[in-house]
Image (cartoon, rainbow, N blue to C red):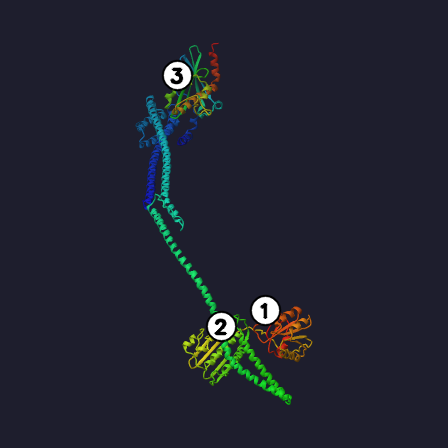
Amino acid sequence: MKFLHWTVLLLLALPPVALGQAYCSLRDPVNAIQTSLPDFDHYRSIVRRIHATDRDAILEALPFTIHENELGTHTLYTAFDENEVLVGIVHVRTERGRWGLTEIAWTFDPDLRVVEMHFQRSRDQSRAYIESEAFQQALVGKGFAELKSMLDEKGTSINPALLDVPADAHDTVVSVIQSALKTILATETVWNSSLARLRENSDPT
Amino acid sequence: MSLRTHLFLLLFSVAIGGATLTFANHRWHASLEAQYQATGTNSTTLEKLRHVSSSLSRFLVTYDLVVFSGITYLGEDALLQLKQLDQALGELPRLAVAPHAILNSKANLKKVQSVLRGAIQGSPGEASGENTQQAEEHLSRVVAELASLTQLAEEEFKRESQALITQTRLQKTTQSASLIAYGTLLFMLVVWSTRRIAGPVDAISEISKYQIGAAIPVLQKKAGPREFQEIAGSIHALIVSLEETVEMRTAELAGQVAEHMKTQDSLKVSNTDLAKSMKDLRTTQRALIEKERLTALGEMVSGISHDFNNILVPIISYSSILIDDPSIEMEERNELLAIIKTAAEDASRVIERLRAFNRKADGTHELEAIEIDEVVEDAVAMAEPRWKVQDDFVPRQINVVCELGSAGTIMGSTAEIRQALINLLFNSVDALPEGGEIRVSTSIEGKYVVVAVTDNGTGMSAKTLEACQKPFFSTKLKRGTGLGLAMVNNAALIHFGRVEIESAPGTGTSVRLLLPRETTKVQKNALSVSKKVVNADLRILLVDDDEFVLNAHAALLRHMGLSPRISSRPLETLAELEAGQFDIVITDLRMPEISGLEFARRVRSICPNIRIFLLTAFEGGLGNASELASIDQILLKPISVEKLKDAILLDPAGSLAAL
């Protein structure tokens, strides 16, 4: 109960400007691009601004809410091979964790399926578990629908039928999956036209 | 085992059980309290750890925004939150659970603060990558340890809470089990005690229901307090003893009853003998009374003879003169006849008194209104010859003074009272051997009429006075029966009165007869002489075997203006008699052909509505009521003109009465 009180006090204490600041990547995800996309040759970043209308569209598709900080300018990293073929996209998301800000670098294939997730910053105790091979395998290849099904209807708890996680890692796992869902939706909503063109250009046919 | 021991064991068991239960309950409570304290401590620890964790969490978000996102205007907030974190961490050293790394974090936070200030102030040195990295490592370590510690504390708290719940449940279960066990123990003790106590009590109760005569109950020995067994034994012994006593007493009573029955039979025989003796005694008493009466009568006879001779003197003398001397003037003749009539009437009264005296008491005392003065006058007249005629021809002068003062009326038997007064007068005469005075008086004292007979004769000694009213006591030797005063006393008793005697030797005797006075006005059965003239048309039949008497009575009737038919032969008269022939039949009682009663019965059968008068010289021997059923009136001879006239003029429905 006291935690809730402090949270409310904190939210009231934060200036509106700060709340309006996007939790964008603090660092370029170069390392993530290099490690998760072996065919990577170079990348290009596409900066877009997430508007309130975009946020509403995202909220409509999600069973859970998102905070005001989701608004603002964000950067999408698109990775190409040497033939200018789009091999993947990387989106760095900053989530508010229990122990400060958590920075997750999401790597998707062109169809927005998870290739890899990587903590760029996290003080969470569950970090090791989430970065473990076992949990990573549970995420790899999953699209929006599969990831959404891993949560309950409200999107605030793990669906135990599909995912078995330790109790102390539960909240962090939920936060990670929610991050993936928001990232996919934001990418499709805000960067949809760019992605369509890139996919088109990458199509060998 | 005694009752006291039983009760002691019962109470001791209850007390021990209760004390044990109370002690155990106290210990359980103490244990639970300790557990609560421990859980409470853990709860406090956990709360503080959460507070630190929350402070750290807020700080880290702001720190990251300032240091890594470059939102430097949140720097002051971050510093403030760092200060709050520092304060929160400051409370942890008080906890035993705080690990070493956290305890040292305060010092390390200075590095974090330095980095933060550098970021805020844009100082590259302070916020250099190396410093930032060191601060980050430190923060990560604190986070890790705090998370670990919080997790441990939560687990500990959870475990403690679970243990507390378990212990509470266990305690409740144990308490319930203990209470059930204690209740069961108590129940068993009560059942045991009840059986141990109730068994002998039932035996006592069973024995106590014993009733005398029933079979003696068997003494059943039941386990239990020694006292109850002793009581049961005592009662049983008592019953046995009682039964033996009852048997013995029953035997004694049977003997007594047999003896009593024997005595009763003997008493019955005695009663029979006694009744016979009583009967004989009554017969003797009646004979004695009759003897006393006859003695008195005998004593009177000589005097009466003397009186009668005196009465006859003028009758004979004057009648001879009247017969022999026709020259006597009418006036002188009438005077002589009047003397003769008076003498004859005196003779009639003498005879009447003698007849009245001769009436025997039949034991029934028919009460009638009596003028006491009249009875006194009669008694004095009847006793008069006794003091006028000297038995032993020794001259003596006895004066009798009557002081009659209209004493009033009593309800009584004339014969009894007159006899009593005669006896008193005789006693007074006997008490005056040399003459003297007898005073007879009547008076009223309260509700009594008093008749006093007083003489100034020899009197009685105290001893004689005491015994004089006892039957058969007499000072007159062979001359007396000893029943005179006893009869006086008896007459007083049957009239609800009493006798008072005062006497002293040489001064005389005074006897007072007190009789209850009749206060209500009594209508005397007065047969007043009517002055009416007898109806000359009355048809009268006069029957008498004695023609002399027949003609005398016929003359009386004719003197009244009637014309009677006379007959000295009753049977012939009956043969000729017809209904409605006569209004009145006057018949003599004793006739040679037929008795007057039988004659009257036959006349009544022929003439139902006729009036029949019976003439008789003897009042006694008239027979019973059924024999007198045909008689309307009884007329006693000699009958005067007035009495005969009254009888004829009386209502035919008048009661039988001797005129």
Question: Dot 2: what SS?
Answer: helix
Q: Which residue is mark 1?
A: B625
How busy is the neighbourhood of tag 2: few (under 14 within 10 Å), some, or many (20 plus)? Answer: few
* Residue type pointed to by label 2: Ala
Q: Which residue is mark 3?
A: A30
Q: Quadrant of the C terminus of chain B?
A: bottom right
Camera sees residue A117: no
Viewer-proximal residue among B181 and B580: B580
Gap in angstroms between the C-alphas marked 2 and 1: 26 Å
Q: Nearer the viewer, mark 3 or mark 1?
A: 1
User: Could you tell me if the residues under marks 2 and 3 are in contact, i.e. CB atoms within 8 Å?
Assistant: no
Q: Nearer the viewer, mark 2 or mark 3?
A: 2
What residue is at 38 percent from the left and 19 percent from the top?
A132
Camera sees residue A8: yes
Q: Chain of mark 1?
A: B
The residue furthest front is B593
Question: Dot 3: what SS?
Answer: helix
Q: Position of residue B118 (x, y in %)?
A: 34, 25
Q: Position of residue B501 (x, y in %)?
A: 45, 77
* Residue type pointed to by label 3: Val
Q: Quadrant of the N terminus of chain B?
A: top left
Question: Dot 1: what SS?
Answer: loop
Q: Chain of mark 2?
A: B
Q: Which mark is residue B287?
A: 2
User: Could you tell me if the residues under marks 3 and 1 are in contact, i.e. CB atoms within 8 Å?
Assistant: no
Viewer-proximal residue among B132 and A106: A106
Gap in angstroms between the C-alphas marked 3 and 1: 176 Å
How busy is the neighbourhood of tag 3: few (under 14 within 10 Å), some, or many (20 plus)? Answer: some
Q: Position of residue B482 (x, y in %)?
A: 45, 75
